[in-house]
Each structure stands twice: as C-alpha cells, then as structure tokens.
Image (cartoon, grey):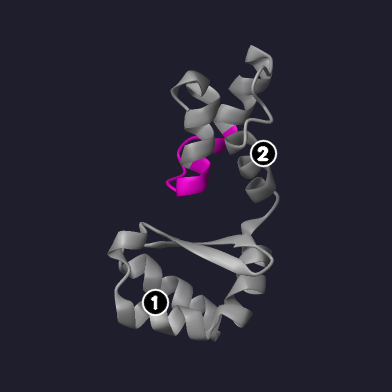
Amino acid sequence: MNTCESLYNLTRTQGLFLSYWSPSAFVVYPAENLNPALEQILRAHQSELVPWLRAQAGPWLHLCKQIVLGEFDGATPERIEILARCLANDPHPLRQAALQRLLCPDDE
C-alpha cells in the first residue's frame, strides 16, 4: 500500500471523505471533523495526494461539478432520472450534492 492509499484509508477510518477538487487542491468532508494533526499530515502530502485522488475520481467528478453548478438545470425528466440513478446510493458528499441539485433544483 502506498502513502496516498494509506492516508486515504486513514481518513475513511475517521469518518472523513478525501476527494480531488482541482489540479492543486483536494477537499476533506466534513471539514469540522478533521483534527489538526491529520490536517498537517495531509497538507504535507498534498503534492502526492492531488494527482492520486484525481486518478481515483473517475469521470463522475466532472459531471457532479457540472450538476452542482447548475449546468443540468432544465434537463429532461428522462435525463434527470438516468443521472439520479447513477448518483444514488453513494455517500460521497459531492455526489450527494449533485443528486440533491438534480432532484430539488429550487432548493439552491
């Protein structure tokens, strides 16, 4: 197991989600549960973690960002149903935010 995988697993055992966000950043959910010691370790390995997390993210990451930003507002009910089925049953916060936006766009 490499360092990135070990750190990812460590965050999961503490009930945290570690996710790629941009070419220079990752996010930790829920941030308020991140202890300072682990935050310092993650920051120290940021240059390794970001590309590793990007490789793990797959194509769904970009899709979720588009949905959250409203780029699928006004999609047909059929399209929304297909996307919702793809996003359902995954606890990842970005997927859940995208699912919420699809199903309840007026709540934003």
Q: Amino acid at mark 2?
A: Gln
Q: Type of residue at label 1?
A: Glu
Residue at (51%, 46%) from the top-left corner? 94
- Pick the front one: 71 or 80: 71
**96 shown above or below 20:** above
Residue 89 on image: x %, y %: 45, 38
Q: Residues within 10 Å of mark 2 (few under 14, many from 20)?
A: some
Give SS at disc 1.
Answer: helix
Q: How many marks?
A: 2
Task: Say whether residue 87 is magenta.
Answer: yes
In the figure, residue 80 lies in which quadrant?
A: top right
In front of the other: 9 or 25: 25
Q: Is residue 99 visible?
A: yes
Q: Point out the stretch of residues depicted in magenta.
A: 86-95
**What is the x, y in percent for residue 68?**
58, 37
Which picture quadrant has residue 22? Answer: bottom right
Residue 86 rendering spot, x and y as whole percentages? 59, 35
Q: Which mark is residue 95?
A: none
Residue at the spot 43% in from the left edge and 84% down from the top edge: 41
Where is 35 relative to 56, above or below?
below
| Element class at badge 2 | helix
Which residue has dot 2 on it?
Answer: 66
Say whether residue 108 is left or right of residue 37.
right
Q: Position of residue 107 (x, y in %)?
A: 44, 23
Residue count near mark 1 (Cα–Cα under 10 Å), binned few <14, some 14–19, many ≥20: few
Q: Could you tell which of marks 2 and 1 lies nearer the N-terminus?
A: 1
Tell me, yes or no, if residue 1 can be seen here: no
Q: CA distance from mark 2 to mark 1?
A: 28 Å
Mark 1 = which residue?
39
Give the farthest residue toward the front. Answer: 108
